[in-house]
Amino acid sequence: MKSYLICLFSFVFCTSVINAQEFHIRGRVIDSISKTPLEAATVHTETLSDSTLIQYAITDVDGRYSIEGRAVHRKIRIVFSFNGYKTIEKIIEPLPNTNIGLVSMVEQAEELEGVSVTGRRAPITIKKDTLEFNAASFKTRPDATVEEVLKKLPGVEIDSDGRITVNGKEVDKVLVNGQVFFSSDPKVATKSLPKEIINTIQITDTKTKEQEFTGDAGDGNTKTINLTLKEDKNRGYMGRLSGGYGTDDRYQANGLMNYFNDTERISLIGSSNNVNNPGFSFDEIYEMVGSARSGGLSFNNNGGFSIGNLSFGFGQGITTSSTLGGSYANQEKNVYEMDDNYFYTYSDSQNEERTFRENLLPDNHFFTETESNFDGNTSTNQGTANLEFDIDKSLRITAKPSLNFNRARSTDYNLSLSYDDDQVINQNISQETNEAYQRKFSNEIRIMKKLDSLGRYVSLVFENQNDISDVTSKLYSQREIFGSNPSFELLDQQTLINSANDRYNINVRYRQPLSKNLTMEFGYGFENWFQTNTRTIFEKNPTRNAGHSIPPSPGQSGHSWLVKVSHPRRMKVSHFWI
């Protein structure tokens, strides 16, 4: 019976593939009255039974389109849609060379901006500078994520690391209903949100805060994706929980929960384990923390890593780690917008190693025993906020404060002993203890003021970054050689490292329109930074007990002037440094 079903399935599948008809459809779309071509009209083909999308195209500047694909049905539907025009549908036979010819579209009596009429939604719609996809038009498995439907969109590519590009331009921001989802990294939304709650996928050029405020177009170097949720899915809970328990009291548990209520969102993350796992993968932590966090990335050999100011495990021995985080976002249009995050991480690592080695030489042999013990832990507290206030239609104030407290402690003990059959040859003992504290505060305050409706505005940006770190390191090392020429070396050293970094930056910019397509910008920037690094070493041995330090570095400052003339097709930028 099983073999019969397999053969039947194979027969049906092969028959469907053989009967699939390759087709090539072309034509031209024009306005019914002016006879001018309609650029960016949507033309798509679909099945008659369930309106499943087969293939689609966007008309070019001459109103021409070309669609190639395969259809398993003898008849299909071709649909023409354009904003402000009545939708046209035709039933055709998919043939290798089908010329539809001219299709004249009739304008609606009352133009509705950005709306496809007659209740039929095209898979792709052009709305001013936004390309909008209807998520339901792209078939996926029932439990698919947003990332899976993105892979089916024209021009969208996703590499193995989850990096998204649209027509070769990187996507640096993914929003949900116009808001940042947990962090500024695009992958956190695309990997965690299910496709079934998505209404449309909108793609546009990424804009700076000034461009958003003034209404200017983006530079086109990067893209932003905005996911609009279905109205009935925009309220409620969504999350995941997982856990496990095994031998030797090994365990792991983690959870991620999101709550939506229109513009309000609350997100919680938590994990704990003792199986050398940060609780979430590096990608998930990186997505939640966000690529915009200051600082770089670092890895060690056994799985530990750091992202900016957050540390996740030493990466050696048995590591117990815990992570707790929360995020709150809300907005009221033309009034305020906020996105606040807090993360706490803790990890403790312990490692013990012992080795025994026999060394064979031509005329003798000797033995070596080593023992090492490591114990260390780290903890991190990080809080960030993005606050935006519209005082009125012409004045906007934003603030981005960030506060971090980090602590790390470790003790590393090593013993090495070499001996032959008769006596001990040498012995080495070392113990290093490190303790470090770091406090970091950064902030950005941005004030933008529109001076008229023609594009004239002035902006003021103030940035500061203040870091303080204290490190205490103790090293005890003893090396002793036995035999006919005995020797003894002792190193007892303590190092104190204190550093402070203060940086302040202020920028003022003014833009003056010279004509409809020509503007001039003037800018001034001042930066002041001061760095103090003190390294004090205390060393104790039979002949010396002293301390010395490195003097602090002097402060510095710099000025910059900017004159910029901008034109849609020409740009000249000049910088003057003092």
Image: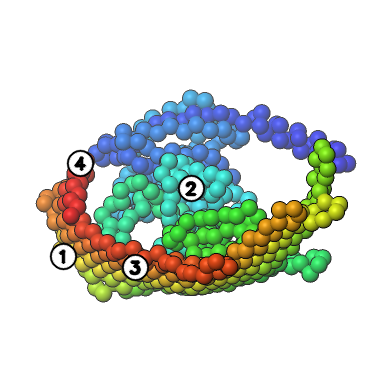
Q: Whole-percent x and y of residue 229?
A: 49, 62
Nearer the N terminus, badge 4 or badge 2? 2
**Residue 416's spot in the image, x, y percent?**
73, 57
- Determine whether, in the image, residue 548 is placed left or right of residue 505: right
Disc 3 crowd rating (10 Å Cα; few below 14, some 14-19, many 20+) is some
From the image, tell me which residue sits under label 2. Answer: 164
Q: Nearer the viewer, residue 176 or 41?
A: 176
Q: Earlier in the sequence, mark 1 or mark 3?
A: 1
The tag earlier along the polypeptide, 4 or 1, is 1
Residue found farthest to the left: 514
* Residue 400 pos. (x, y %): 37, 69
Residue drawn at the location 79% of the way across and 37% of the way down: 8
How dense is the environment of label 1, judged by Cα within 10 Å: few (below 14), some, or many (20 and up)? some
Q: Nearer the viewer, mark 2 or mark 3?
A: 3
- Which residue is label 3 attached to? 502
Q: CA separation, marks 1 and 2?
A: 37 Å
Q: Are marks 4 and 2 in contact (CB under 8 Å)?
A: no
Tag on residue 570?
4
Instruction: Determine the secondary structure under disc 1.
Output: loop
